[in-house]
Amino acid sequence: MKDITNLHPRKILACQLRQIGDVLLATPAIRLLKERYPDAELHVLTEKRCLPVLENNPHVDTVWVLDRKALKNPFKALAWYAGVARQGFDLIVDFQQLPRCKWVVRFSGAPVRLSFPPKWYNRFLYTNWGPLVYGYAAKCKAGVLAPLGIEWNGERPELWLTDGERAFADGFIERHGLGGRPFITVDPSHRRETRRWPERHFAELVRLLRERHPELGAVILYGPGEKELAETVAAQAGDGALVPDAMLSLREMAAVQERAAMHLGNCSAPRHFAVAVGIPTLTIQGATGTGWGFPSDEHVSATKGLPCYPCNSNTCKLGTRECLETFTPGENLPEALRLLELGLKKKGF
């Protein structure tokens, strides 16, 4: 591999297609690239559903939005990949090595094509690769940039909210009777059963928090098809818990979270949005390892700590989901209270 520490690219493409949380976790690396090469055009390739994560980001000059539905025809898709690739990039950084990323890399002819260590059969696609880095996911992504002389120094994910989005959050808070009151956001959903803490546990933990802080509200978040679950949690949690009538967009959700004292949830995208907007988080870990948690005592990844953890499986091989079912709200209450009180102090309550 050639030495690229003295590279001076004019045009850079960063490839990070999905998932939503992963794109947000790539924003520290995007910032580091722009800071290293401030005069270069920085383009990002991502999927349509992830575009809101990058909106208003001052470090990104152009976003290439991959619409998978519009590119179902393989010939049309290949033509689109080639069109992106032929923009004259001097440097391509591929954070994923997914097939669609690799097509763009293959068509590009960029003199420097950088990624993490590829399998032997993919090595012809890349000119350079950085060492594998373990730990927090954003740190791992930034590790790809090591051959450029760039390293992660604790930068957190970034979301650049607008004044209009913050005004929406203020209106939401007033409409739901939360004006002047502290509240938390709660994300009880996850499409994988091994990563979803039981709804009754979320409800009970909210009740326990309200026993210590009776004025506390709780906004129960939900995504497509998840409103019924959110309503179940709110009903079981009792007074102070509410479910938005309409599902919040990603950026609306983040703006509401920015006004909250704490976020409580499963290991999914809202935890990363909460980090980006600067509020404490308590994440209940099931099968997933703690590498998704920002390394700070303001962001806790709580685990039952069973011998089988982390299994990273989508189904419980024991059939019990013991790591979640027996991980009681009472066990999580001390950390939840610590984080809540830290958030309340930050918000001036």
Image (cartoon, grey):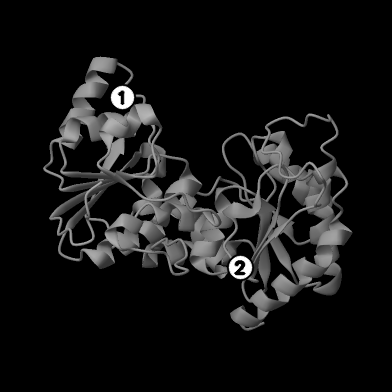
As shown in the figure, which amino acid type bears the numbered disc 2?
A: Ala
Q: Which residue is mark 2?
A: 260
Residue drawn where x is 27% and y is 28% of the image: 103
Q: Is residue 194 left or right of residue 43?
A: right
Comparing 293 with 217, the one in front is 293
Query: Looking at the image, is mark 2 or mark 1 nearer the viewer?
Result: 1
As shown in the figure, which amino acid type bears the numbered disc 1?
A: Ala
Comparing 216 with 198, the one in front is 198
The x, y position of residue 253, in whole percent, is 53, 55
Residue drawn where x is 77% and y is 68% of the image: 335
Residue drawn where x is 47% and y is 65% of the image: 156
The x, y position of residue 190, in whole percent, is 65, 40
Asked whether the viewer can see residue 329, the reply is yes
Quarter of the image holding residue 246?
top right
Q: Is residue 253 left or right of residue 266?
A: left
The x, y position of residue 141, in whole percent, is 43, 52
Q: Secondary structure at mark 1?
A: loop
Q: Could you tell which of marks 2 and 1 lies nearer the N-terminus?
A: 1
Residue drawn where x is 62% and y is 68% of the image: 280
Q: Secondary structure at mark 2?
A: loop
Q: Which mark is residue 70?
A: 1
Q: How many marks?
A: 2
The x, y position of residue 24, in whole percent, is 44, 53
Quarter of the image holding residue 121?
top left
